């Protein structure tokens, strides 16, 4: 059997990279578009700034799996955010299908439980070139009252810790969490875990439906490996400038205090 290579860029940058180049490797832009053409032309427009793009449900459903290949063909790394959550057999099968598309990261919901998480991990482990599985902990749009409304009597950070521990016990070492829980999760999961943080908002930008947010600087200081940014870049009047400003903020934060 061919040696298995996980398609994952190192979140720890190689020492020879400049802080700016390292910043490029740690920013993931969420391509939340409703058609392949607009997503691809946006990716082309930002190709100098962005290495990583995230394909979420809106784009994946509208454009189909070929969008992954089209971004990979252009030299991009793809985070496929399908947030799989179903019975273990169904999730394992979906991991097998999604895992052959060429994405470097794939999301599953940690709240699917330990058996589902283990089934996903086992399915990924059998793929020749699997994406890194990321267990989504508590969505960044949730606050304590929203959690309570779903029957969870814990604070977001307590719930993130519980779900992350379930993930770790199931052999998963990558997580999506809010930057507000990055420090707690880094302490729990250790230096080798991959922490991907959406809910990133540069100072002064619109918050929208997000509840647990932080700036790029704060997320990195708290141990985030990758920062996911959508609307602050995609909805900006000049997306290149918005991306550039975030990259410079990341580069500065990395130059001052490399986190990993
Ligand atoms: O899994 C995700 O990527 C995700 C998890 C989460 O807890 N919160 C969250 O916002 N996301 C995604 O991250 C992106 C954030 O987009 P903006 O709020 O526009 O920056 C969206 O594509 C969300 O689907």
Image (tube, rainbow, N blue to C red):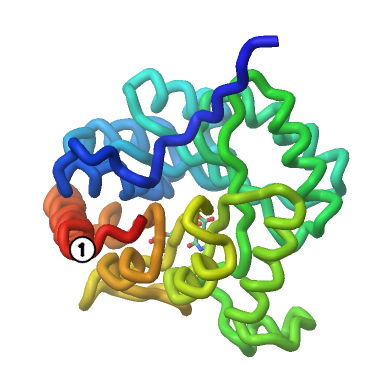
Residue underneath mark 1? 253
User: Residue 175: x percent and y percent?
Assistant: 57, 56
| Residue 35 quadrant | top left
- Residue 185 at least partly seen: yes
Q: Quadrant of the N terminus?
A: top right
Judge from the rendering whether residue 161 lies leftward or rightward of residue 26; answer left or right: right
The mark tally for this picture is 1
Judge from the rendering whether residue 26 lies leftward or rightward of residue 108; answer left or right: left
Please tell me which residue is depicted at 86% across the width and 48% down the height of the picture: 87
Picture layout, residue 252 above or below residue 124: below
Residue situated in front as seen by the camera: 260 or 19: 260
Judge from the rendering whether residue 36 lies leftward or rightward of residue 156; answer left or right: left
Crowd tier of the residue under label 1, counting other residues whose Cα lies within 10 Å: few below 14, some 14–19, many 20 or above: many
Picture layout, residue 98 above or below residue 70: below
User: Residue 180: x percent and y percent?
Assistant: 45, 76
| Residue 161 quadrant | bottom right
Judge from the rendering whether residue 93 lies leftward or rightward of residue 135; answer left or right: right
Please tell me which residue is depicted at 22% across the width and 34% down the height of the picture: 47
Q: Quadrant of the C terminus?
A: bottom left
Element type where label 1 sits in the image: helix
- Residue 228 at least partly seen: no
Please tell me which residue is depicted at 16% across the width and 57% down the height of the picture: 255
Picture layout, residue 231 above or below residue 32: below
Please tell me which residue is depicted at 48% across the width and 40% down the height of the picture: 79
User: Residue 68: x percent and y percent?
Assistant: 49, 28
Q: Is the distance from the Cβ of mark 1 to the nearest ligand 1 atom less than 8 Å?
A: no
């Amino acid at each position: 059997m061919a040696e298995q290579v996980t398609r994952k860029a190192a979140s720890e940058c190689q020492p020879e990279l400049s802080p700016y180049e390292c910043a490029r490797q740690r920013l993931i832009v969420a391509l939340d578009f409703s058609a392949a053409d607009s997503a691809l032309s946006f990716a082309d427009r930002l190709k100098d700034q962005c290495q990583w793009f995230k394909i979420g449900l809106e784009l994946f459903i509208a454009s189909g799996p070929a969008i992954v290949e089209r971004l990979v063909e252009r030299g991009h790394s793809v985070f496929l955010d399908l947030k799989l959550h179903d019975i273990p057999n169904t999730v394992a099968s979906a991991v097998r299908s999604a895992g052959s598309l060429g994405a470097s990261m794939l999301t599953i919901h940690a709240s699917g439980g330990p058996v589902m998480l283990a089934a996903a991990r086992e399915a990924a482990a059998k793929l020749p070139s699997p994406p890194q599985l990321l267990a989504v902990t508590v969505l960044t749009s949730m606050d304590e009252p929203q959690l309570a409304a779903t029957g969870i009597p814990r604070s977001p950070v307590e719930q993130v810790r519980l779900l992350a521990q379930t993930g770790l016990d199931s052999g998963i070492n990558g997580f999506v969490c809010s930057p507000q829980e990055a420090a707690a999760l880094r302490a729990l999961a250790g230096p080798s875990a991959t922490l991907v943080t959406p809910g990133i908002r540069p100072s002064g930008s619109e918050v929208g439906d997000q509840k647990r947010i932080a700036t790029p600087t704060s997320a990195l200081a708290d141990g985030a490996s990758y920062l996911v940014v959508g609307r602050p870049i995609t909805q900006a009047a000049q997306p290149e400038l918005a991306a550039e400003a975030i990259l410079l903020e990341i580069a500065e934060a990395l130059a001052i205090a490399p986190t990993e």
